[in-house]
Amino acid sequence: MKRSHIPGVLDVFEVSDPEEIKAVNGDPRMDRQFDSRTCPLNWLLVKRSLNALSYGGIRFPTMTARDSAVRKSKQQALWERLNLKVPEVRLGPEELEPLAEWVRGDGVEETLGQQTQQFLGRLFSETFVATPETWDAARTLVKAPRSSNILKLIWWSISGKLRRAKQLLAGMVNDDLSAVNAIGIAVHNLVNSLRRMKSVYADTNSRLNLSPPEVANRCLIAPASLYRQATVAGELNGSQFSNNSLFVLNIGSAAKLDRSLVFMRDSWSSCPAEQWVPAVLEGVWLRATRTIH
């Protein structure tokens, strides 16, 4: 762990080692309460994310505290609902054809994001229709939590661009914040996974010999990073931390070494789509390669 510390101003740990990430995330002293303004720069980092990843005064599930009963209940319900769809989507149903077509190189490059958003949106609303506007809203939403362009973020706030993006997406999925997270944030990970799959498909040897599960595992993309904050002072793996120290878990890079980190498997913050997303990728690959088997 690498600490950046200016007493009373900044206290941030960068965590990139897979085992250290698991240790931080599994420690009951680390949470997503994010309710302290002790260090101004810590608070600015957290505030930027909370401003983007909340709607109507309610945080997205990915920014909600570990002891939230509502979060636990909704996370479990979505887990169960998605898992019921795994066997079917793994077989490459017709709804995956636009994504498979793109992987084969037959689709239009600019439409991948919109098509992926359409697929995800239909999980939550049968009437969802992705448009260039909804995809632009998703791009705004995913940039807001980590953008280093402060002037742009200020302008988005003043102009209402970020608020309108969330309003548009939420209105299409009945204000379900798990759904907004899916079509506004998680969708970009799936898009990047499909981009990686297209590269795998372009290699003839891989196309002919890799199984769908092998391809899915190779193509999974994790979020770049997650925030956790210490609720008390203490020590972890030989490193002293303060009450309200902010931990940045760089799972995007760490997941290349430990694939379980893609979905934070077997942890309190595990992703409900842990089984469903790999099944989707398997289905897309199966459909994309069906004509050559």
Image: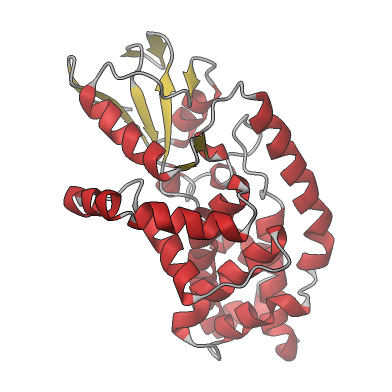
Please report the residue visible at 63 percent of the width from the left and 57 percent of the height from the top: 173
**Left or right, residue 118 beside residue 231:** right
**Left or right, residue 80 beside residue 142:** right
The picture quadrant where one finds residue 277 is bottom right
* Residue 211 placement (x, y as % from top left): 70, 70
Question: Can the viewer see residue 290 in this picture?
Answer: yes
Q: In this view, does 114 lie above or below 3?
A: below
Q: In this view, does 98 lie above or below 276?
A: below
Please report the residue visible at 47 percent of the width from the left and 36 percent of the height from the top: 18
Please, which colouring scheme is shown?
A: secondary structure
Of residues 41 and 225, the one nearer the viewer is 41
* Residue 144 placement (x, y as % from top left): 34, 50
Please report the residue visible at 40 percent of the width from the left and 45 percent of the height from the top: 52
**Left or right, residue 151 beside residue 134:** left
Please report the residue visible at 40 percent of the width from the left and 37 percent of the height from the top: 50
Of residues 5 and 152, the one nearer the viewer is 152
* Residue 84 placement (x, y as % from top left): 83, 53
Of residues 171 and 178, the one nearer the viewer is 171
Q: In which quadrant of the rendered image does the C terminus lie?
A: bottom right
Q: In this view, does 239 lie above or below 282?
A: above
The picture quadrant where one finds residue 218 is bottom right
Q: In which quadrant of the rendered image does the N terminus lie?
A: top left
* Residue 126 placement (x, y as % from top left): 73, 66
**Left or right, residue 31 beside residue 287:** left
